[in-house]
Structure formats: C-alpha cells, structure tokens
Amino acid sequence: IFPTIDLGEVSDEILNQKLREASERWGCYRVINHGVSLSLMSDMKKTIMDLFERPYEVKMRNTDVQQWSGYTAQSEINPYNEALGLYDTASPQAVNTFCDQLEASAEQREIMVKYAEAIRGLAKDLLRRLAESYGLADTTNFFKSWPSEFCIHKYHFKAEAVGKPSGVNLHTDWGFLTILQDDENVSGLEAMDPSSGTFFPLPPLANSLAINLGDMATIWSNGRLCNVKHRVQCNEAKTRFSIASFLLGPMDTDLEAPSEFVDAEHPRLYKA
Ligand code: AKG
C-alpha cells in the first residue's frame, strides 16, 4: 500500500506533487527509475557483504563518532543484527578512515565514494522537489551543508528467529530523509500507517530504493511531513543486507520551520 513513485515522470509538477502527497500521508514510499546506477547498487552490496566477512577485531575498529556511526556487534540482547556505520559520507577523509579501518581494497573504496555521492545527490534532489512542491523554491539550498551517514546492516535470520523482532525495533529516523537499499530477496521491513496505527510490510522490489522521512522533516514542515515509524522483523531464515543512508540535518544550528508553514491554523509546533 505504500506508494511506488517513478522518478522518470516527465512532469516536474506532477512528480513533486506525488512526492509531497506520499511524504505527508505515509512518510514512506519506494522509488523506481531513481537514477542511481543499478550496477553501482550491486557493487555496493557486494562490497558491504565482503566487509562484514572481516574478523570481529577488524570490524571493532569501526568506532563511534556520532550516534549509530560505529560497529554494532551481535550480542545476547541483539542476536540477529550486526551493523557498520560511517558518519559524514561526503567527507573523503571520513570515507578513507572507514575503509582503512576495515581494510577495504582500492576498488571497494572507489565504489563507496561513488555510491555515497550518487545517493546524496538523489536525497538532495528529493528535498529540493519537496521544497518546490510547497512553493519554497528560493530556500531549496537549505540542506546543502547537512551531513549524511551510512548505517549498513547484516541480519542473521535463523529459523528460531522467524516471527521475532530483528534488533531494529520500532523507531523513527532522526534525520530528514533516509534512502534505503534494502535486500532485494529477503523481506522484513515494516512501516506503520500513521492514520490507523497498523503495520504494513514493504516487500522487496528489485532495483528500487525505499525512502523514509524522519524527525527533521516533521520539524521543518511544522508537522506536515510524516516521520514514519518503522521496524525490521525476521520473516524467513535467510541473511538480509540493507544499506541505510541518512541525510541528517543541521549540526550547528537548530532547524526552524520556514514562515510559509506557520499561520493561524498551523501555529508553530516546535520551538528552538
Ligand atoms: C535503519 O537503519 O534505521 C533501518 O530502519 C534499517 C531498515 C532495514 O534494514 O531495512
């Protein structure tokens, strides 16, 4: 039921309107014809699958510099999920440190850089379109300096895990917009319909990307955009990979809704 939006739509006006409607109603949708090269997506998946094969001691070098940015190992309280994180994907230095820590090859490094750039480009394009859909064309650069972060997951789903939460429990993303390359073969992602509180699966769809709106989007839009609640469940005894790329928000200042979102009917909801 979550919409799938074709970014190849020729009319900017129609496309921007679709993105706005999906972002307000669901806070979650899939995109196809998104412009991120399919071979780059496949190379990135191969790269992260290989990085997860590193010994525990090597993965532990991926330390935290921001919330969720370091390595999370499987543990007694988190038996099914393992995650690697990279804060500030637009910084060559940050990408290099991440790759050094994980002993990535030169080719893998190049793939990470290209993927980060392509995904960040798409995220910015989606934000620009959203801003335009509200007639805020003049402010479309407000996100230019916001950092991006990768959270890369490997889910070890075993028969005994089926029907259980995976370790990625119900949450909203704190940034503005998340682009998720979820596993094209293994399901698990579920999002809540904000109007009924019911959970719906987002079944895998090859070559697509899933988009989630986060808390910063709700703050910026004075409550119009939905920060979708979502989680990952174990549905089948298979290994599942996903790459979440967050376009976060301003790091040194507070985010305020532009005055266009505030009027007598819509008083300011979030104060700095
Ligand atoms: C997150 O990293 O915030 C997620 O929700 C991951 C979702 C997924 O693995 O499909």
Image: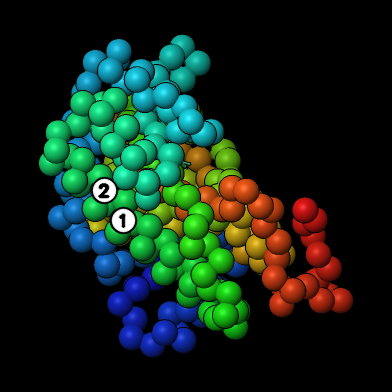
* Mark 1 secondary-structure assignment: helix
Give the labeled residue for mark 1. Answer: 117
Please tell me which residue is depicted at 67% across the width and 57% down the height of the picture: 255
What is the crowding at mark 2: few (fewer than 14 residues within 10 Å), some, or many (at least 20)?
some
In the foreground, 12 or 252: 252
**Can residue 67 be seen from the camera position used here?**
yes
* Mark 2 secondary-structure assignment: helix
- Give the distance between the C-alpha atoms of the residues marked 1 and 2, in whole angstroms: 6 Å
Of all residues, the one furthest to the right in this rendering is: 264
Across and down, in percent, residue 180 comes to 38, 50
Please tell me which residue is depicted at 31% across the width and 67% down the height of the picture: 34
**Looking at the rendering, which quadrant does residue 12 occupy?**
bottom left
**Can residue 215 be seen from the camera position used here?**
no
Say whether residue 199 is left or right of residue 14: right
Cβ of mark 2 under 8 Å from ligand 1: the answer is: no
Please tell me which residue is depicted at 42% across the width and 24% down the height of the picture: 63
Of all residues, the one furthest to the front in this rendering is: 93
Q: Is residue 100 above or below residue 185?
A: above
Give the labeled residue for mark 2. Answer: 113
Q: Is disc 1 in contact with disc 2, using a CB cutoff of under 8 Å?
A: yes
Across and down, in percent, residue 153 comes to 36, 34
Across and down, in percent, residue 79 comes to 42, 18
User: Which amino acid type is shown beneath numbered disc 2?
Assistant: Val
Please tell me which residue is depicted at 81% across the width and 64% down the height of the picture: 268
Say whether residue 251 is left or right of residue 240: right
In the foreground, 139 or 37: 139
Dividing the image into four quarters, tell me where ligand 1 lies.
top left
User: Which amino acid type is shown beneath numbered disc 1?
Assistant: Glu
